[in-house]
Amino acid sequence: MNNENSYPLASHPLAAELFAARQAAMEAATLVRRYWRTSMDVETKPGDEPVTRADREASDLIVARLGRAFPGDAILSEEVPDSGARLQHSRVWMVDPIDGTRDFINGDDGFCVMIGLCVDGQPRMGVLAMPANGDVYTAIVGAGAYKESTGQPMVPLATTTLAAPPGIRLVASKSHRTGDVDSFRRSLGITDEVNVGSIGVKVAMVADGRRDLYVYPGSRTKIWDTCGPAAVLLAAGGKITDVHGDPLAFDRPELVNRTGIIASNGPLHPQVLTALAPLVANRDMPR
């Protein structure tokens, strides 16, 4: 991995935050990888969500690292009860120690460690670490996004430029895919779809140009699922909103993203919103 002094974002005002999050995410990814494809006890949390010892240990590691480095900031982790204190802070770290836990438990590779920093309710910095292959995505919104792979030079991220069908490459949920996605696919002539567990992995695939679009019209995601990925995608030139085209909200008491997610390369976004409109109207999704 690259030396911090030569890192492209080393002179940015949020460089210290980025490097601290990157180091914590990489350490957590190493921890998680030790449990991957081993026998583990799996518990079930409210909402029928699985959780493992690896989730909790990775959360403890990241929260401790960030808490020591930035004691004045609030930290929200999936594995720590939300006290609501974050609502009184302008800077809030959002942590998902293993996003895509089902893939992790099943021995698949569609999971990642995610850390994001919101400033005044807006995602400003994000880190996504992929334990299965060692890739790390880092980004500061407005300054750039980068991918680091073991033994390879760091590369800047850029989304695709496809602005209309045909040829849209969709990535969709593996465990929470709804039948609505099929009608949406038909409306845009999408024939190329892959399915992955982690939101972070799906958004990373749009950010690095492997996919053009991720759509999830449901309401099962949380704000810790979307903060880090949103920062990476925005910094790579993409766009992320809810299904109405409104920005995702990160500074409300509620943790759930009730109005879905559209994460696109950017140019496709208007057509996607138009194609989704009948589905949104039919389901009477809240606003």
Image (tube, helix red, strand yellow):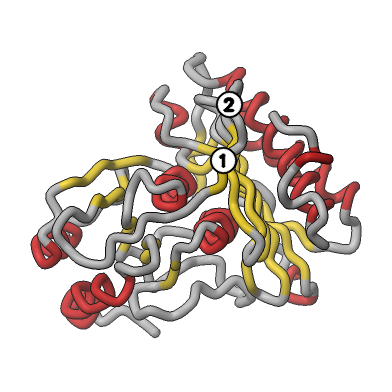
Question: In terms of depth relative to the viewer, which is nearer, 249 or 263?
Answer: 263
Q: Residue 270 in the image: x percent, y percent?
A: 30, 77
Q: Is residue 261 visible?
A: no
| Side of 166 relative to 115 (left or right) | left
Identify the residue at image location x=43%, y=72%: 241
Identify the residue at image location x=38%, y=41%: 197
Q: Residue 211 in the image: x percent, y percent?
A: 33, 48
Q: Residue 86 in the image: x percent, y percent?
A: 74, 68
Q: Residue 52 in the image: x percent, y percent?
A: 56, 32
Disc 2 marks a residue whose amino acid type is Gln
Residue 269 location, quadrant: bottom left
Q: Which quadrant does the N terminus fall into? A: top right
Element type where label 1 sits in the image: strand
Question: In terms of depth relative to the viewer, which is nearer, 175 or 42?
Answer: 175
The residue identified by callout 1 is: 155
User: Which numbered dot is residue 152?
Assistant: 2
Identify the residue at image location x=79%, y=59%: 12
Q: Are marks 1 and 2 in contact (CB under 8 Å)?
A: yes
Element type where label 2 sits in the image: loop
| Side of 105 relative to 11 (left or right) | left
Residue 165 location, quadrant: bottom left
Q: How many marks?
A: 2
Which class describes the residues within 10 Å of circle 1: few (<14), some (14-19), or many (20+)? few
Which class describes the residues within 10 Å of circle 2: few (<14), some (14-19), or many (20+)? few
Disc 1 marks a residue whose amino acid type is Val
User: Which numbered dot is residue 249?
Assistant: none
| Side of 122 relative to 12 (left or right) | left
